Image (cartoon, grey):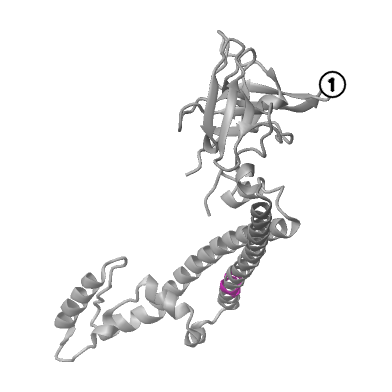
């Protein structure tokens, strides 16, 4: 498991960001976090106990087997080095066999001259037949602890899989439901002729304000007013809102966003807004939620991108909500 700090796992950090998720999904992710912590702790305990027990077993085997090997081999023992490749082990076995084939005219099996590796000892530990070598109560208790930790780790891993599958089922069901609702809503809009218009901000009426993209795929958007909208061709006729301009634009729907309907903004939202005393849209970040003013209108406080003063300080600016739109995009 990755860590975002010394004491906090990635999963713990992630859970802090999911406060808005449904209760059932939050519960599953919280449970996964707890299981993950327990599993990591138990796995580390298992590793420590296994290393300790392996060392004790190796020492016990040496005390039991080594005297017999020395006696059978005339006082000489060939010991296999650990942490070597399989090729090295095979080569050493061949050399040992050649050297140990006869001792005082008597053949001594090579296997009697080799001390087990740590990996082999670990295999003996988990073999039920090895329990016959355990004598002390301390060894039996430690072996029982080893088996208990192994079973605990396996159980925790299985529980994590079950909870993860359960969380996936919750998300999958929600996504399927959303897909179904969206398809239904799309059909409804198409039947009423509002589907295409809704993609560009809504059904346009004369004198509605709109953001327009004079040149296709340009990043520049300016404020304009709808003169007419031909539903058949999808073409808009608009006038520039700049008081010093008398320009008239004829643009397709893909270059027009009818303003309005953006009323639920939160601090930190990225929007496009008309910069004060201009008719040009710029990217901005909402600094304060929208507020109503007398007369039925409303405004929002924003920070425009790259709008710092000579000291590098960006000041909040008030923008009328009717001069705000979501970040524009180009349909492909």
The relative height of residue 190 versus residue 217 in the rendered view (above or below) is: below
Q: Relative to 231, does residue 114 appear above or below in the rendering? A: below
The main secondary structure of the magenta stretch is: helix
Does the magenta portion include 240? no
| Residue 143 quadrant | bottom right
List x then y, in percent, for residue 106.
18, 91
Q: Is residue 126 left or right of residue 40?
A: left
- Image coordinates of residue 236 in percent, x first then y, are 57, 32
In percent of width and height, residue 227 lies at: 63, 27
Q: Is residue 223 above or below residue 331?
A: above
Q: Nearer the viewer, residue 164 or 302?
A: 302
Asked whether the viewer can see residue 327, the reply is: no
Q: Is residue 236 visible?
A: yes
The residue that disc 1 covers is 295
Left-right relation of 64 to 312: left
- Span colored in magenta: 148-153
Residue furthest top in the image: 310
Identify the residue at horizontal 69%, vertical 33% (top origin).
Answer: 205
């Amino acid at each position: 498991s990755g860590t975002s700090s010394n004491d906090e796992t990635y999963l713990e950090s992630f859970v802090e960001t999911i406060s808005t998720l449904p209760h059932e999904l939050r519960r599953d992710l919280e449970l996964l976090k707890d299981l993950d912590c327990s599993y990591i702790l138990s796995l580390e305990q298992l590793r420590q106990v296994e290393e300790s027990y392996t060392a004790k077993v190796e020492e016990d085997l040496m005390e039991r087997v080594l005297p017999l090997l020395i006696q059978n081999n005339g006082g000489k023992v060939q010991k296999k080095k650990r942490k070597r490749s399989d090729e090295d082990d095979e080569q050493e076995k061949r050399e040992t066999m050649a050297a140990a084939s006869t001792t005082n005219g008597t053949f001594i099996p090579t296997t009697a001259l080799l001390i087990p590796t740590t990996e082999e000892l670990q295999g003996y530990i988990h073999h039920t037949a090895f329990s016959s070598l355990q004598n002390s109560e301390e060894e039996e208790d430690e072996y029982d602890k080893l088996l208990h930790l192994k079973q605990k780790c396996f159980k925790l891993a299985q529980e994590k899989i079950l909870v993860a599958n359960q969380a996936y089922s919750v998300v999958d069901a929600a996504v399927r439901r959303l897909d179904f609702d969206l398809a239904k809503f799309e059909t409804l809009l198409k039947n009423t002729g509002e589907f295409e218009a809704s993609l560009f901000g809504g059904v346009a009426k004369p004198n509605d304000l709109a953001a327009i993209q004079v040149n296709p795929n340009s990043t520049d958007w300016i404020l304009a007013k709808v003169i007419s909208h031909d539903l058949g061709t999808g073409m808009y006729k608009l006038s520039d809102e700049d008081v010093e301009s008398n320009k008239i634009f004829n643009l397709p729907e893909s270059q027009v966003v009818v303003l309005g309907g953006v009323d639920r903004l939160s601090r930190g939202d990225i929007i496009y807004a008309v910069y004060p005393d201009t008719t040009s849209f710029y990217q901005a970040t909402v600094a304060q939620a929208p507020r109503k003013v007398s007369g039925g209108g409303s405004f929002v406080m924003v920070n425009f991108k790259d709008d710092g003063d000579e000291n590098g300080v960006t000041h909040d600016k008030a923008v009328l909500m009717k001069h705000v739109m979501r970040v524009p995009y180009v349909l492909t």
